[in-house]
Amino acid sequence: MPGLGQIVFALVSVLAWLNPARPDLPGTVPRDERRALTIELLIVFAITFGLSGLRSLLSLIDDVLDYSKIETGQLVLEEVAFDVREFMDSSLSLMAVPAGHKGLDLIGDVAPDCPPVLLGDVTRLRQIVVNLLSNAVKFTARGEVALTVRATPGDGDEMLLEVAVR
């Protein structure tokens, strides 16, 4: 039986092929068939690997679709209000299980002078931070992985968010 990684790679490849942002790919599937196939693939994956596996797959699919949008110049960054502490906590919670398996502590710290709510593309920011956290967990043998968040003044009313993983 193929491993989870092989199955995820195959599914992501199929979903990239089904991606409507890439009509240049040979044999592009019509929109109604694409939806049905995508839903079917996600259901099979959820039954086989459970909810956490499905979340991982959906995250990979988002990454593939974002890459495709970048290639075609269609990526638009959102500007929505988000809670900085919730962003940090949710990013850390996604890595709690792998860190726990390795006996690593996950630490999060928001600087006291950081505004509690900021405007930005929290989805893209979370993708980047979770990727950094994942690498930190993967390559840390013992101890802790820390996520720190602080804001510094930018131009005019803007704030620059500084996020560090160590």
Image (cartoon, helix red, strand yellow):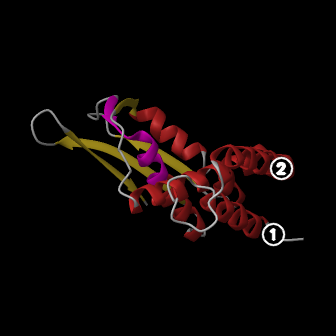
Q: Establish if 111 lies above or below 59.
A: above
Residue indicated by mark 2: 44
Query: Is-magenta flag for residue 119?
Result: yes
Label total for image: 2
Would you say residue 83 sits in the magenta stretch?
no
Helix, strand or loop at label 2? It is helix
| Closer to us: 45 or 38 | 38
Residue placed under numbered mark 1 in the picture: 3
Residue 23 position within the rendered picture, expressed as x and y whole percent measured from the top left: 52, 59
Amino acid carrying label 2: it is Val
Residue displayed at 36% across by 45% down:
76
Q: Amino acid at mark 1?
A: Gly
The quadrant of the image that shows the N terminus is bottom right
Residue 21 on image: x %, y %:
50, 54
Chain part drawn in magenta:
117-129
Q: Earlier in the sequence, mark 1 or mark 2?
A: 1
